[in-house]
Image (cartoon, rainbow, N blue to C red):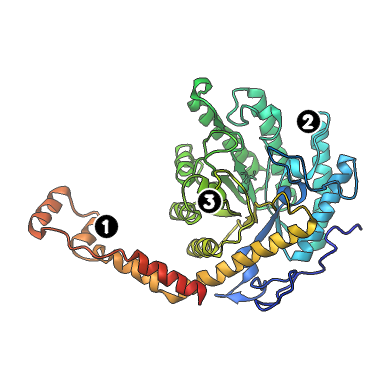
Amino acid sequence: MKEYFSMIDKVVYEGAESKNPFSYKYYDADRVIDGKKMKDHLKFAMSYWHTLCAAGTDPFGAQTMDRSYGGLTDPMEIARAKADAAFEFMTKMGIEYFCFHDADIAPEGKDFAETKKNFFEIVDYIKEKMQKTGIKLLWGTSNCFSSPRFMHGAGTSCCADSFAYAAAQIKNVLDAVVKLGGKGYVFWGGREGYETLLNTDMALELDNMARLMKMAVEYGRKIGFDGDFYIEPKPKEPTKHQYDFDSATVIGFLRKYSLEKDFKLNIEANHATLAGHSFEHELEVARINGVFGSIDANQGDPNLGWDTDQFPSNVYSAALCMLEVIKAGGFKNGGLNFDAKVRRASFEFEDIVHAYISGMDSFALGLIKAYEIKEDGRIDEFVKNRYESYSHGIGKKIVDETTSLEELEEYTLKNGEPKLKSGRQEYLEAVLNNILFR
Ligand code: XUL
Ligand code: CO
């Protein structure tokens, strides 16, 4: 079989002192942290689209990366070569999961029947490779945003035929996910949003989106899908206003339409920052509302206002993210998918290897540091003490819900001015640095 990543054999852990660029410096898959192997804490997944399909285009330039897989021209041959390259890459890197859109793995045919045939042919091809390698599917999704047929949206389209087309795609991907033993199906609202309210019936669009999701749940459960459905929040891009703006907005939507039993959130770092939040904020909102599910790991650029989908190298952010994952009790059906692409000028297959090594090492280090933060205990202790006034007296009555405005007025008349303590933010930031860099 043709080799695409000939620069690597098997990428292994060599430790922080190693200068071998094709080795992990921090990711030691079998190292046990708090009773669990690193690989099971992190559950790294490869994104099919960015890794095998993205070719370096941007709004100003043509593709910089050859994705013909050795000069192939037949789309189905390319699809098989992509799968070969994907499984060669994951095997060599020790990545145990992957995620895909229908459109990533197989080409569209002349009509939907042919598209469906192409899709399931490649699904079977991939299934064989999964059986041979033990690599698993983290989640699948449907690309209901690239084709012009979705210019007005899919589940939120003004055109019922576009809605139906999307539903047909979702049905097929759910069949594929079940066939491949996947534990997740993602709804990222590609074009589920609006450009102008002048032409938009927002109430109908949102009701319809929920209808599509309900049908997906109904069908998925009927065919034996026992994993999680996810919504992946994003505030803008490609539409001006995406309906799934952020975690809080999505939680409101799920509760309004009684979807919270089947849905969790897939939180993406760059989407969080686009919404004006930190990554850890979005994770914490999901966690405290019981809908933390999975992660799309990447990072944006603070100087740019769009979704740059860069490989994550910010260990500070990775540590705070992994702290949230630990607090959530770890991944169950979810995992850590690198929804990230190499830069346009990093056009060689070798760059993909460096990108994943850097991303995986950043999160491995993030995990190690998150446990150190937990073990160290200074930050948790501080937070606990900060709210200690709610553990007794009037504070306890407030959290026990056994007081009233009348009683609190009476209390305040006697108590006078509140006696406050410092928030000590600068001290806590120094503690964090002390743990991260010692
Ligand atoms: C786009 C994005 C998608 C989803 C899957 O911003 O994040 O790749 O993760 O459709
Ligand atoms: Co994503």
Report how far apart the C-alphas of labels 3 and 2 lie in the structure: 41 Å
Q: Are marks 3 and 2 in contact (CB under 8 Å)?
A: no
Q: Which mark is residue 399?
A: 1
Which residue is found at the position 22% from the left and 66% from the top?
392
The first of marks 3 and 1 along the sequence is 3
- Residue position for label 3: 302
Whether residue 135 is visible here, answered yes or no, is: no
Looking at numbered disc 3 in the image, what kind of residue is underneath it?
A: Pro
Q: Quadrant of residue 382?
A: bottom left
Look at mark 2 in the image and give the residue it sits on: 112
Q: Position of residue 28 (x, y in %)?
A: 66, 73
Looking at the rendered structure, the kind of residue marked 2 is Phe
Q: Position of residue 144 (x, y in %)?
A: 67, 35
Q: Earlier in the sequence, mark 2 or mark 1?
A: 2
Which residue is at 64% across, 56% downward? 311
- Disc number placed over residue 368 in the picture, else none: none
- In the rendered image, residue 36, in percent from the top left (x then y), is placed at 59, 72
- Identify whether 236 is placed above or below 179: above
* Local SS, label 3: loop
User: Is residue 388 left or right of 416 when viewed as pictured?
Assistant: right
